[in-house]
Image (tube, rainbow, N blue to C red):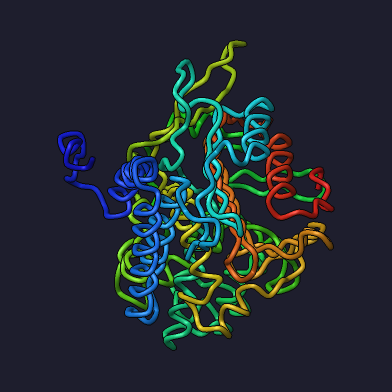
Amino acid sequence: MLAANAEDIELKGNTVAELADRVLPALTAAMRLLGKQAPAEADNFRDTILLALEAAEVELDKPSTITADMARKVAAALDAAGVAGADSEPAVPNTVAGQDRPELQKVIEEIVDSGFVGVSLRVNDERGEWVGSAGVAELGETAKPPIDGHVRIASNTKTFTATLVLQLVAEGKIGLDTPAGDYLPEFGLDERITVRMLLQHTSGVFNFTGELYEDGTVVLGIPAPGTPLGKEWVDNRFKTYRPQELVELALSKPARFAPGTGWSYSNTNYVLARLLIEKVTGRSFAEEMRQRILGPLGLSGTLVPETSPEIPEPHAHAYYRYEEDGEEKIVDVTRHNPSWNPCGGDMISTTRDLHTFISALLSGELLPAELLAQMCTPHPTGIPTMDYGLGVFVRDMGPDGGIVITHNGGHAGYATLMYSTPDGAKTMTASLTCVDDSVMSIGVPFQNAQQRLLTQVFGGGRTNPAN
């Protein structure tokens, strides 16, 4: 069957994983045909392949995430043909077809109905892998969002950044409780601010995208989506910012609190983390990310765009809305220069890569056990049932759902969800697109959407979305 369709299979520029996704349906079709014509031979063939997969994993001693994922997909393709004998057990979980998880498809369709343009969801659990999408990839069109399209992951970038910093801590190149100013003396940072405080958002440093204080006071930062300066950001969305100028702007404003005495989410912390990485390694953040995380995990759909406005195909589109002269305008902001939020929100990825990353991280592939434990140790944030570690939120889903490790992201019409059990065994990753605006009108639907998904996948549901 592959030979008959060879002209339709384009090999150039595709990764092994991408090619596998295109070839495996043919394997399923071939197995179905064999099952009809010679059921016994189909069972023998399936069992032989599964034994070969097991042997390969033993041979490799510790197979990579990519190898394990490929083995799972091959086994799933065999099982999808429905020819396995009643007594046979799959070597790895089945990939569950969309029609077999109607409750998940129903939830994402309801999320679209609540105001989103499109949703793509990926769940990996004891039942295998499920992927699905709802809505549209582009306003005015009918095509659904790609199930593994590229998306701007916004603040999910922080988990990647924190992991990279902790790898340098493991190598003795950075001290977690060393003053950050020892590495970055040019900024004159408060000497009480440690590297840990940057990753934990306990430094008190002003957020360069602006601050909202408890009394309702707003102090503006640079033009950014989701702020009162959203229209200015749209008009200048191809502007390049230097990380140093963002830090200098933040440090020109009063600190929110004394270092270590409170918690407040600040993008400035992660710009400082980026500069810290570059200072101690002598290489760019993008280079270090590729060498230490993206390459070893085979995250071919993930990149650090730096100042490039491009986003690889396939992808869904994102939009921004504002009023001008009493008239509502909606602008496609899919392409923009992401340097306005370096390391705090500029990376691009896919739901597949986010699953691979968070699963590998929490299963111990990227960090020593002691540092992974510190990463996931909760620090109070003041948000009910949701504390913060080092680049991750630690969320309590209640007695039925347990603890999940997460980081979400959202800006400029894109949003991403990344959730996992603490052992990395069960994950949920999603990308959402919307028409964003300065008043964050999508905020409540977004909170409701993620709560619906969390309850469906992890159980629990004690958390009040209004929080």
Q: Residue at x 18, y 45 (%)?
A: 11
Q: Is residue 227 left or right of residue 467?
A: left
Number of numbered discs visible in the structure rendering: 0
* Residue 411 visible in the displayed image: no
Q: Is residue 380 left or right of residue 25?
A: right
Establish if 138 lies above or below 126.
Answer: above
Q: Is residue 207 left or right of residue 39?
A: right
**Coordinates of residue 300 in the picture (x, y in percent):** 33, 55
- Viewer-nearest residue: 299 or 374: 299
- Viewer-nearest residue: 231 or 384: 384
Establish if 38 lies above or below 119.
Answer: below
**Coordinates of residue 365 in the picture (x, y in percent):** 46, 75
Quadrant of res 315 = top left
- Viewer-nearest residue: 326 or 432: 432
**Coordinates of residue 323 in the picture (x, y in percent):** 59, 18
Q: Where, quadrant-wise, is the N terminus in this rendering?
A: top left
Furthest residue toward bottom: 172
Establish if 370 lies above or below 214.
Answer: below
**Coordinates of residue 382 in the picture (x, y in percent):** 80, 60
Q: Residue at x 37, y 52 (%)?
A: 42
- Viewer-nearest residue: 7 or 394: 7
* Residue 385 visible in the displayed image: yes
Q: Residue at x 84, y 53 (%)?
A: 462
Q: Residue at x 38, y 56 (%)?
A: 74
